[in-house]
Image: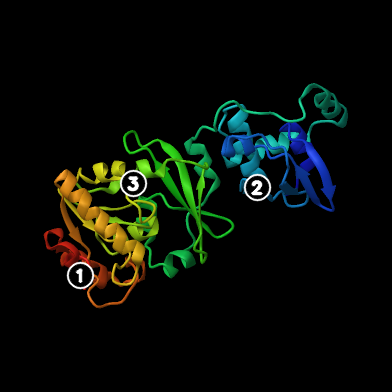
Amino acid sequence: MSFNIPQVLANLSIEIVRARGSELLCLCPMHKSRTGKEDHNPSWWINEDTGAHICFSCGFKGNVFSLVAEVRELYIGDGLDYEAAKQWLANVEEISVEELAERLKRVPTHVTSTQSIPMSEARLALFTDPPEWALEKRRLKAESAHRYEVLWAPDNTWILPIRNPHDYSLMGWQEKQEGVRKFKNTPVGVKKASTLFGGHEQNPDMVIVVESPLDAVRISSAGIIGAVSTFGAIVSDAQVKLLRYSDTVIAAFDNPNIDEAGRNACAAMIVSARKYGMTLKFFNYGSTGIKDVGDMTDEQVQHGVETAKDSIYGEKAYLG
C-alpha cells in the first residue's frame, strides 16, 4: 500500500523544508509536545516511498499510520486507531489537486500546540502482540505478556505501558529494543517514577519488585503472581509507598553480588523498609552467578522467591 506522502503531509499541516531523493525533511510535528520547544532546526525525515519517519532530535518515529494517528490526536483529539488512520489516508488520496492547493492557502505552514499530547488507549492499537521468537528468547509466556499488556513495534521493540497507579489510565510507555540495552520513554518526561509497571498484578499478601518490566513478566511466566517493576534500579519514595500495599515485599533487583546498581538498590530498600515499617525480604540468588531473574530457569526463579532472606539480617540478606 502506497500513499502520496507530500499530500498526506499537507493535509496534516506539516511543512516540507526540502527533499533529498525520496527523503523529505520537515519541521517535526511532535517536537513541542515532546520537548516543550518549537522545532526551529528541523531534523525530522520521512521516506516518500515507505512512509517511515524519524526525528533525530526528539526521537519521534514510526510509520505513516502512526503519524496520522498521533498528529491528529494531538491537534484534533480524535484518537484514530490503525483502521481509522488507514481510512483517513484513503480519503486523502481522493482530494483533487485543485482542492489541495486551495487548502494550502488556508492553513499555516506549521501547527503548534499549547499543551502536551494527551494519552489514549487508541495509541496502543498501533502495536501488536510480541512474536513467538521474541517471547521464547526471553523465556516469556504469551499469557503472561498479555497479562502485563506487553506489546511489540515493527522495529523489534518491546512496548511496556506506563499507567497511573490509581485509575489505571495510560500515561505513556517505555520502549526497549530487543538486543540493545537502551530505553526510551514516550512521551518524554513521563513520570514513570510515580507508578509501578504491572501494578494491577500486585498481590496484597506479597509483591516481588524487579528493575526491568520484562523481568516482572519473566517471574509471572515462572508461575508466580505479584511481580512489579520500578522501571530501573532507583526506587522512588512514591513507588515505595505503592509497594506497602502488600504485606511482604521481596526485592529481586539485579544480582547484588555482581551488579553495583542492584546492590545500591537493595541497600536503599532497607532504609525505606525501616522508614515505613515494611516487611522486606531479598530474592535469593545463592551462588548462581546469574545477573537477573530474566536469565533464570523457572525452578531457579521459584527457589529464589521461596528462600528469600529477611532484611532483618541487613547486608547479609542480599549478599553472599
Q: State the colouring used for the structure image.
A: rainbow
Within 10 Å of disc 3 (Cα), the crowding (few <14, some 14-19, many 20+) is many
Within 10 Å of disc 1 (Cα), the crowding (few <14, some 14-19, many 20+) is some
131 horizontally vs 258: left or right = right
> Which element type, helix, strand or loop, lies under badge 3?
loop
Residue for badge 3: 196
Task: Give the residue at x 59% y 25%.
Answer: 114
Q: Quadrant of residue 117?
A: top right
Q: Position of residue 118 (x, y in %)?
A: 51, 32
Q: Earlier in the sequence, mark 1 or mark 2?
A: 2
Q: Position of residue 208 (x, y in %)?
A: 25, 56
Which numbered tag is attached to residue 57? 2
Within 10 Å of disc 2 (Cα), the crowding (few <14, some 14-19, many 20+) is some
Instruction: Farthest residue to the top: give it.
Output: 106
125 horizontally vs 276: left or right = right
Residue 205 visible here: no
Q: Earlier in the sequence, mark 1 or mark 3?
A: 3
Name the image quarter holding the C terminus: bottom left
Residue 157 visible here: yes
Q: Nearer the viewer, residue 200 or 245?
A: 245
Instruction: Farthest residue to the left: give it.
Output: 312
> Which element type, helix, strand or loop, lies under badge 2?
loop
The amino acid type found where label 3 is placed reads Leu
Separation of residues labelled 1 and 3 (CA atoms) = 24 Å
Which numbered tag is attached to residue 60? none
Residue for badge 1: 303
Q: Earlier in the sequence, mark 3 or mark 2?
A: 2
Separation of residues labelled 3 and 2 (CA atoms) = 29 Å
159 horizontally vs 17: left or right = left
Q: Position of residue 243 (x, y in %)?
A: 24, 46
Foreground disc of the pair 1, 2: 2
